[in-house]
Image: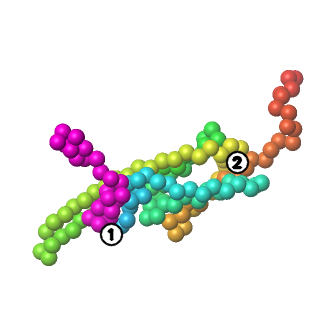
Amino acid sequence: MANELMNRFNVDPFFDQMARRFFSPSDVDNDYMVQGNLKTDITENDKDYTLKVDVPGIDKKNIHLVYQNDNLALSIDQAQESEKKDEQGRVIASERSHGVMSRTYELPGVDRDNISAQVNDGVLTVTLPKAAESEDSNNQIEIQ
């Protein structure tokens, strides 16, 4: 009996997600915000890195990118509201949710002045051109 009381708030993730989708107050499926997933594909070639991050339903004004110390930091801050009224216009349900996600990617040697980003069809694409390598591979500095 004591164990049942101790574990009564321990929810199985599968059934919790299913219940959340079934009983969700809004028509928008924002499960990825609840789980905090930022599904990312990264490709690299001789000229640049390209990141593709799934951001369905996120307005670009809520996406923040910063490149510093060879790291690209991505953060998303999203708030949603839902209100349902009956036939007389009385509010019968009002729901609010707020989610914050962030992720950092280590991408060294980037020309930070030429980084570009765009959102299209729920996918954030960030192109990070590589900085031109110096012709002299010797890192030693000559003293005058």
Q: Which residue is mark 2?
A: 111
Graded by Cα atoms within 10 Å as few (under 14), some (14 to 19) or many (20 or more), the crowding at tag 1 reads few
Q: Report the span colored magenta.
A: 1-25
Q: Nearer the viewer, residue 129 or 7?
A: 7
Residue 66 image position (x, y, % from top left): 56, 46
Quadrant the C terminus occupies: top right
Is 3 magenta? The answer is yes
Q: Is residue 80 above or below residue 69?
A: below
Graded by Cα atoms within 10 Å as few (under 14), some (14 to 19) or many (20 or more), the crowding at tag 2 reads some
Name the side, left or right, on which 64 lies relative to 35: right
Going 70% across and 54% down the picture, which residue do you hit? 44
Q: Quarter-wise, where is residue 143 in the image?
A: top right
Q: Nearer the viewer, residue 45 or 47?
A: 45
Going 68% across and 54% down the picture, which residue do you hit? 49
Which secondary structure type mostly characterizes the magenta part of the structure? helix
Q: Taking the image as drawn, is residue 78 in sight?
A: no
Is 24 magenta? The answer is yes
Q: Which residue is mark 1?
A: 27
Residue 4 image position (x, y, % from top left): 21, 44
Q: Is residue 84 above or below residue 69?
A: below
Q: Mark 1 is on which residue type?
A: Asp
Quadrant the N terminus occupies: top left
